[in-house]
Amino acid sequence: LIVNELERGGLSTTYLARDRFSPQYPLCVVKCVPLDQLDDELALSLRQKIQHEAEILHRLGRVHNQVPWLLAYVESEHQICLVMDYIDGEPLDQVQQPSTDTIITLLENVLSVLEFVHACDVIHQDIKPSNLIQRHMDGKIVLIDFGTAYQPNTDAQSTVRFGTPGYCPIEQQNGNPVFSSDLYALGVFAIQLLTGIEPTQLRPNATGDMLDWHDYLQNAVDPHLVAILDRLVKIQVRDRYQSATDVLLDLQQLCEVA
């Protein structure tokens, strides 16, 4: 039972709904992709893309409670729908320049999810505030929208480039995402929280090895945290953190020193 429209973008529409097949009609989210107005090639491509998203959600969501649970996958000749559990919370794009401690907690929370997602051989490819929902119930952050997720050891390389401008590192823009591409995007988000600067305004520094953001800081920030963020947003993959686990270890040491 559709309650209202949540988002319309690209070729899909997302609705807030109630599941009339479950007790007490719990809220859920329905992502619909109409196919009947599309040519055969595009319809087939979209069908494969949504099937891919459903398979990833089915595999990850039933194991980790910070990934949405896939409730149903409904396919017809006219449209495809994904039904997911509703996350009662606030997207992190509503956060207004929190304290350094809050940012560290957010980073640890998201990194723990990415550690799991990457261990499952999935690159999210669209880490940004609107895809991170802080759940009211326990304060944990749920990673949503796996529509552009990529499995490097399974999926064929796509000619389509995915990602959101500002958060998307150069290798991903070139169609060669790696696990640290998600870490770069997370680093950009943390810098956005600290400075209030939109990611599209950030540019490489004079040496071209990382994003130039220090001058946007309005308050003093622990130099150890600055060093962690600097490494997250290195331009070259080889200079960046290679795993979420490595970032978590450095954040843990930062908290111990503090």
Image (cartoon, rainbow, N blue to C red):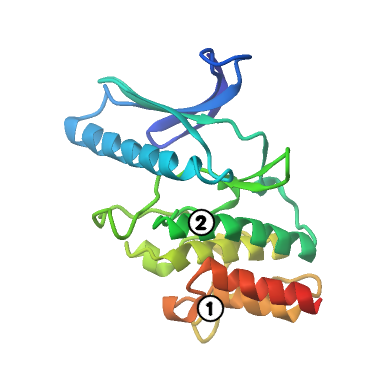
Q: Amino acid at mark 1?
A: Met
Q: Which residue is mark 1?
A: 210
Q: Is residue 101 left or right of residue 133?
A: right
Q: CA distance from mark 1 to mark 2?
A: 26 Å
In this view, 106 is above or below 251: above
Front of the two marks 1 and 2: 2
Q: Which residue is mark 2?
A: 116
In this view, 198 is above or below 234: above
Front-most of residues 236 and 109: 109
Front-most of residues 65 and 78: 65
For numbered disc 2, what is the local secondary structure? helix
Residue name at image x 76 percent, y 59 percent: 102
Residue name at image x 28 percent, y 55 percent: 154
Q: Residue furthest front?
A: 63
Q: Is residue 215 visible?
A: no
For numbered disc 1, what is the local secondary structure? loop
Front-most of residues 29 and 188: 29
Q: Amino acid at mark 2?
A: Phe
Dot 1 or dot 2, earlier in sequence: 2
**Quadrant in the rendering for residue 170:** bottom left
Q: Is residue 114 left or right of residue 100?
A: left
Q: Which mark is residue 195?
A: none
Q: Is residue 51 visible?
A: yes
Residue name at image x 54 percent, y 66 percent: 244
Query: What percent of the width, then of the height, locates residue 33?
Result: 37, 28
Number of other residues with Cα within 10 Å of mark 1, as a class: few under 14, some 14 to 19, many 20 or more: many
Residue name at image x 57 percent, y 20 percent: 4
Q: Is residue 35 left or right of residue 25?
A: left
Q: Residue furthest left?
A: 40
